[in-house]
Image (tube, rainbow, N blue to C red):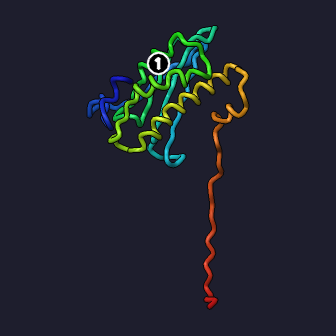
Amino acid sequence: MTQFFLGYRKTALEPTEVLTSLFVPWTRENEYTRSYKQAKRRDDDIAIVNACFRIQFNSDRVIQEAVLAYGGMGATTLLAKKTGDALVGKKLSLELPSQISSILLQDLPLQASSPGGQIQYRKTLSQSFFYKFIVYVMKEINTSLDPRLISCIDEIHRPLSCGEQVLITKAYF
């Protein structure tokens, strides 16, 4: 996929080509993947930032592979390569996000003039997605976590909103 997206709304497909399938392999033992999206509206909206993470660790919870991909942080999807490399060899823990946050920001260099604005918000959101992912993985491997911490990974489901309009036909003045 790193060679597929060439620029904003531009792919490596020739004009006569059509993408007919995409293979996503099953995860392996001690491998976790998760994606996140933040948009102005919940459904059917362009993401402000989105992210997908994959991490694999050994039986001692030492990270062996880490891939962090972000959308909305550049013209195309960006891989946080330095961050992934920095995670390899580290033990899986809740301290990881704060340990690598400065490296992550180096991997996602938004300038003040970047299209879409909201630069600080997008940088903070990119870090919080990774934090959410680590909490998710820790919960999945049955780590004892504070329930308040687990609340950050719970989906918030809201019913559709509805309204009512009443037309008054008499004048009351």
Q: Is residue 167 above or below residue 116?
A: below
In which image quadrant can residue 171 be found? bottom right
The total of numbered circles placed on residues is 1
Find residue 87 and report its horizontal and vertical position in percent.
50, 16
Helix, strand or loop at disc 1?
Answer: helix
Q: Alpha-carbon neighbours of circle 1 within 10 Å: few (<14), some, or many (≥20)?
A: many
Query: Image point 41% across, 40% down: which residue?
Result: 119
Q: Amino acid at mark 1?
A: Gly
**Residue extending furthest bottom?**
173
Say which residue label 1 marks: 84
Find residue 41 and report its horizontal and vertical position in percent.
52, 49
Query: Image point 44% across, 30% down: which residue?
Result: 70
Which quadrant holds the N terminus?
top left
In which image quadrant can residue 58 be found? top right
Query: Image point 35% across, 40% down: which residue?
Result: 112
Q: Is residue 46 above or below residue 92?
A: below
- In the drawing, does residue 12 fall left or right of residue 60? left
Between 43 and 105, the one nearer to me in the picture: 105
